Image: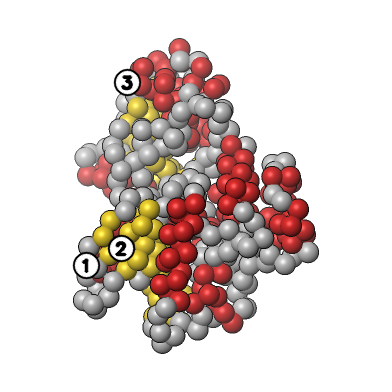
Amino acid sequence: MFGAGKAIREFASSLLDFVSPGDRCELNGTEAFENNRMLVRRGTHPLPDSETVQNSEKLIEHALGSSENDHVIFLISGGASSMFAVPHETATLAEKREVTGTLMSRGANISELNCVRRHISGIKGGRFASMVYPRKVCTFMISDVPTGIPEDIGSGPTLPDRTTCSDALAVLRKYRTTVRLGRKVRSRLEDRRLETLKPEDRRISRSSAFTIAANRDAVMRLCSFCREQGLTAFVSRYTLSGGAEQAAKLLIAEGRRRLHGKGVIAAGGEITTKASAGARGGRCQHFALICSGMLHRDEIVVAFGTDGKDGNSDFAGAVGFSGLRGCREGPNDFEGEKCHRTMGTGLLTGKTGTNVSDIYLYCRL
């Protein structure tokens, strides 16, 4: 058993009860840990560092040291794209960090970001599965991708990829990041020599995958909990994505339309933001600030990351209400943490041990 991600230690612990007592798993997670059945090496997020690459190479070496008759279980949770990382031989770690960081800062969504990641990686887009072929690979995933596209979860190290080098180049050009890659990588993308594994590739034929938890599961459970407390609660008809302002208008308008008294509308998703250099905050805190300029006195919005960490902030998310309108610098400068700390509206949970993207609540009081 192998795997990577923010929730990987808890994920693996829950599955070890169902496998042979002698089996041991090797993982990349947020913190190093070891016992008689589990070895967790450190991986960084949202960008990989040299230690992450070294630890990923050790994991691969161990996998290749197994018998070809062995069955490989691979676990993926949110953060795996960064925490299980080996650049393609034509790219350097510095190039990968530069292009990934730039795409994030310019507002690329997760599908666009992971399309590029797959094509400049030595292990994503099914390449890890091809390395361990002909072993059978079974992948279990906790999805942090609101779209539910399997290859976007952890950038799909064991899954076939439906995107192409042309798609990756289109994303790079859209966000003006092509020059961030070296000439060798660009030329190989252009002549399609960095193509990922496709569904018909025999090296992926012995690989299967199952999503066991996703964003919508969390949203539906939260609505059920609200109803158990006697509240009116609905699951939103939308998965929020794109810019914060448009997403905020969508959620607030739906809440006002569907709720005729006190109640809650719960939506999942992952909006995109363009962070200012050196600012501290996250997309959920930013969303709360944007909403605050649109809300009435009897409305609040709550937005939080299910992993307990929003962006580069200590907060998991924040509460937004009409009284936050005086905090003008937050939305403009992406200084969400500063504003929410001042106003006492930041949500501090600590790490939750899972990651199924973000949840956004519209509440009428």
Residue ID for mark 3: 344
Q: CA distance from mark 2 to mark 3?
A: 39 Å
User: Quadrant of the image for the N terminus?
Assistant: bottom left
Q: SS class of the residue under badge 3?
A: loop
**In the visual, does 147 lie left or right of 193?**
left
First of labels 2, 3 by sequence position: 2
Q: SS class of the residue under badge 1?
A: loop
**In the visual, does 163 lie left or right of 86?**
right
Residue 198 lies, in percent from the top left, at 63, 72
Three-letter residue code for mark 3:
Gly
Which of the two discs, 2 and 3, sits closer to the camera?
2
- Vertical relation: 206 (above or below) 178: below
Residue ID for mark 1: 36
Marker disc for residue 39: 2
Q: Are marks 2 and 3 in contact (CB under 8 Å)?
A: no
- Neighbour class for label 2 at 10 Å: few (<14), some, many (≥20)? some
Query: Visible in this render: residue 85?
Result: yes
Quarter of the view holding residue 313: top left
Q: CA distance from mark 3 to mark 1?
A: 43 Å
